[in-house]
Amino acid sequence: MRVLGLMSGTSHDGIDCALVQWSRDGDLLTGVVEHTGTVPYPPDLRAAIVAALPPNRTDMGAVCRLDTLVGRAFAEAAATCPAADLVCSHGQTMYHWVEDGRVRGTLQLGQPAWIAERLGVPVVSDLRVRDVAAGGQGAPLVSAFDLPLLSGLPASAGRTGALNLGGIANLTVCEPPLAYDTGPASALTDAAVRAATGMPYDEDGRLAAAGKVHEGLLTELLAEPYYHRPPPKTTGKELFHAGYLDRVAGPYALGLPDLVATLTALTAETVAARIRRHGLGTVVVSGGGVRNPALMSALRERARGVRLPPSDDLGVPSDAKEAVAFSYLGWLTAHGLPGTVPACTGAAGSRVLGAVTPGRGPLRLPEPLDLPPRRLQMSAVAPGTG
């Protein structure tokens, strides 16, 4: 079964696509990543998304327009990919409603009907809310993919985990199963660079490499209560946004390189502290942060002795890891299988995730399966051959 995963994360810069051919043999599920790509949001749509995110205020008219325009953008992105049997669309997270550490609701925009209409195949969408309704955090859902993927690592890897460095950093720990957002990855550095230069991010970590960490500001940033809450927990742009940065870092009046260096150190330390706490020996890393040499160097320094291979080494392209994971979650839903790990999200139990929008003609899904796969084996088709 070919499932197309579509994902736009907390960096909200574009839509990641991953087409995976899934084949099951007993408790082993094999995934061949046949296509990956990223389709940037049109500049006016990205600007509208940013304008609607906290701490800005918006109205229902803007929400309706974004739901349609993001849905159309996802449909256009899906149309650039080879044919699929099913699409699993994450949509664009606009708000994660958290009070006193409990997630009350979550909102992802991007009407799936536009994808179903354009491609003519069923679409799984709105995956997070079922976990929230069951008492979970709604994130990180990628833990359901990480655990069977990492199960094949050798004993010499030690205690293992998976780290994704997007706008927000999330960590999955295998034994015992645990997953949560550690804090910002690029969310605050992106906000600082955008405010000062209009550019979307610190390309190749050049600003961070040119700056010096301000230990006083770093200490104040590390005092943020979120870092000290026990998992399961999740966060996003509703907390770590430009207004938060202005409030905490504004009084220091640092030059941009020093500010970005300090924010990069914040990401490295908050992640490394969790890696040390869980005694991990190997952490498989994915996301845009993998391409930031300053961030990866700081992380290696603060998590000294821990192996940090990219997810590419396990057959999962690091730029598309979360899109690949949502392809897997779509496969699970299509087969009637749960896509949550209660120990990771805090839900009352495992749940089949999402809603299904039919394509053209009758809705036909595979026969339900009794048990999810215990092991994942991934490989990627070389670019230009798929």
Image: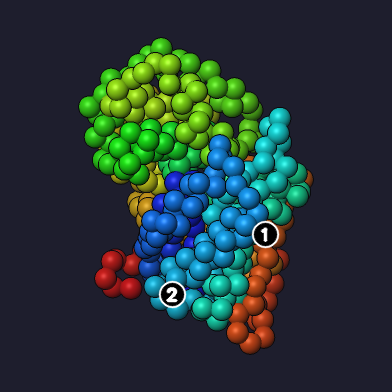
Which numbered disc, 2 or 1, marks the residue that appears first in the sequence? 2
Which label was assigned to residue 214? none
Q: Mark 1 falls on what kind of element?
A: loop
Crowding near the residue tagged with mark 2, few <14, some 14–19, many ≥20 C-alpha atoms within 10 Å: some
Q: Amino acid at mark 2?
A: Ala
* Residue 373 drawn above or below residue 185: below
Q: Where is the C terminus found, in terms of image quarters?
A: bottom left
Q: Quadrant of residue 86?
A: bottom right
Q: Which residue is rendered at x = 47% and y = 33% of the image?
A: 242
Q: Quadrant of residue 283?
A: top left
In the current view of this chain or complex, which residue is farthest to the bottom? 361
Side of 54 where 217 appears, left or right = left
Q: Nearest to the eye among marks 2 and 1: give it.
A: 2
The residue that label 2 is drawn on is: 79
Image spot of residue 105 (x, y percent)? 70, 46
Q: Which residue is rendered at x = 60% and y = 72% of the image?
A: 113
Crowding near the residue tagged with mark 1, few <14, some 14–19, many ≥20 C-alpha atoms within 10 Å: many
Distance from disc 2 to disc 1, alpha carbons, whole Å, reads: 24 Å
Q: Which residue is rendered at x = 60% and y = 80% of the image?
A: 359
The residue that label 1 is drawn on is: 353
Image spot of residue 79 (x, y percent)? 43, 74
